[in-house]
Image (cartoon, rainbow, N blue to C red):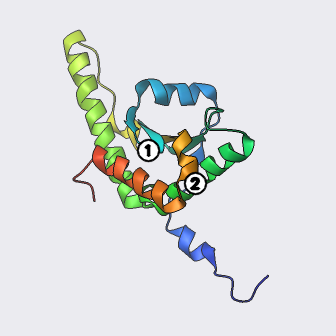
């Protein structure tokens, strides 16, 4: 090991710990029920949940295996270095999405007379990032900038 190598453990301790979404049903739920934002390089899906989990996707439309892996690596780097890596921002967005969902659900349940879900059930966030073909022409900073921009557009007051 190099003597001058930086110690990344200290930096990552303040970052969010995201579980990986692994089941197709989890991805389908985020696609079906989540909030979607489309950019030139990527698509972001967000869904309030009871935990913090993420999925990184690059379909064969992006390219061969090497190109798909590069796209996923760029998305992971943007997620770690950008807004999703800041716990205070993620918690604010999670709360905002949960409140928005509760309002919509309570309006629906008010009409039907059912019980609205409890806000404690949505104390987390599921995020799916989908690479688009143009991501191969971009650098890491471009991807991070677009991801942060898409997320800020969702909640402009949360900075």
Q: Nearer the viewer, residue 141 or 12?
A: 141
Q: Residue furthest top?
A: 112
Question: In the image, what residue occupies the spot 55% across and 69% down?
Answer: 13
Q: Nearer the viewer, residue 156 or 109?
A: 156
Question: In the image, what residue occupies the spot 45% across and 23% down?
Answer: 32
89 displayed left or right of 99:
right
32 displayed left or right of 69:
left
Residue 1 numbered mark, or none: none
Q: Residue furthest front?
A: 137
Inspect this view and state whether residue 50 appears: no
Query: Where does the image place residue 137, in percent across and percent down from the top left?
Result: 55, 51
How many numbered markers are drawn?
Answer: 2
Inspect this view and state whether residue 148 appears: yes
Query: At numbered mark 2, what does the secondary structure look like: helix, strand or loop?
Result: helix
Question: In the image, what residue occupies the spot 55% across and 56% down?
Answer: 17
Residue 74 numbered mark, or none: 2
Quick check: 58 above or below 25? below
12 displayed left or right of 96:
right
Query: At numbered mark 1, what does the secondary structure look like: helix, strand or loop?
Result: strand
Residue at mark 1: 124
Between the C-alphas of marks 2 and 1, the distance is: 24 Å
84 displayed left or right of 135:
left
Query: Where does the image place residue 62, in percent across and percent down from the top left?
Result: 61, 38
Query: Where does the image place residue 58, in percent across and percent down from the top left?
Result: 61, 38
């Amino acid at each position: 090991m190099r003597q001058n190598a930086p110690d990344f453990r200290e930096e990552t301790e303040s970052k969010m710990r995201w579980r990986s979404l692994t089941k197709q049903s989890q991805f389908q739920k985020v696609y079906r029920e989540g909030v979607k934002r489309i950019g030139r390089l990527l698509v972001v899906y967000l869904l309030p949940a009871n935990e913090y989990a993420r999925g990184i996707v690059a379909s064969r439309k992006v390219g061969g295996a090497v190109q798909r892996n590069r796209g996923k690596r760029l998305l992971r780097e943007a997620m770690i270095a950008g807004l999703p890596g800041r716990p205070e921002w993620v918690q604010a967005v999670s709360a905002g999405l949960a409140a928005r969902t509760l309002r919509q659900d309570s309006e629906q349940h008010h009409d039907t007379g059912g019980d609205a879900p409890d806000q404690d059930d949505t104390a987390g966030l599921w995020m799916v990032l989908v690479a688009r073909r143009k991501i191969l022409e971009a650098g890491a900073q471009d991807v991070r900038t677009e991801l942060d921009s898409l997320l800020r557009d969702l909640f402009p007051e949360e900075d």
